[in-house]
Image (cartoon, grey):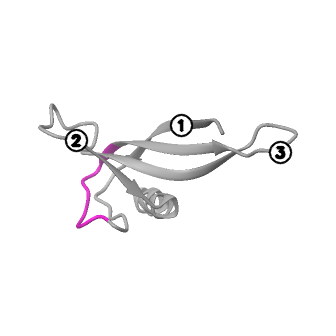
Amino acid sequence: MPDRTTRFIAHFTAPFVLGGLEGQLPAGDYDIDHDEELIDGMSRLAWRRIATFIHLPARAMNNPPTSQLVAIDYMDLETALMRDRENAA
């Protein structure tokens, strides 16, 4: 079954917390990857998200000594982004 990875940038204006990660993450722009698989048997193309990953540290960190790709829950990410937008307003 064909798979794909879609990418986007999540922008946080304030420090935030994601379930499964220790402590607060600093505000900034974070690369997010969604791994998806093609749903078979559909009359049109449809994709199902099977995993979500965040790249740590944030993009603004100049030449970090190491970086990590960490699996996160998609709904935790959406909740954190929603809270950030609400608090920024």
Q: Which residue is mark 3?
A: 41
Secondary structure at numbered mark 1: strand
Question: From mark 1 to mark 2, how far is it between C-alphas?
Answer: 19 Å
Instruction: Tell which of 36 and 56 is nearer to you.
Output: 36
Residue located 45% across and 56% down the image:
81
User: The residue under label 2 is which amino acid type?
Assistant: Ser
| Mark 2, other Cα within 10 Å: few <14 / some 14–19 / many ≥20 | few
Residue 39 is one of the magenta-drawn residues: no
Q: Position of residue 8 (x, y in %)?
A: 48, 38
Instruction: Tell which of 29 and 89 is nearer to you.
Output: 29
Q: Position of residue 85 (x, y in %)?
A: 46, 56
Q: Which mark is residue 24?
A: none
Q: Position of residue 10 (x, y in %)?
A: 42, 45
Residue located 34% across and 67% down the image:
20
Which segment is the magenta one? 21-29
| Mark 3, other Cα within 10 Å: few <14 / some 14–19 / many ≥20 | few
Secondary structure at numbered mark 3: loop
Q: How many marks?
A: 3
Q: Is residue 52 above or below residue 4?
A: below
Residue located 43% across and 61% down the image:
80
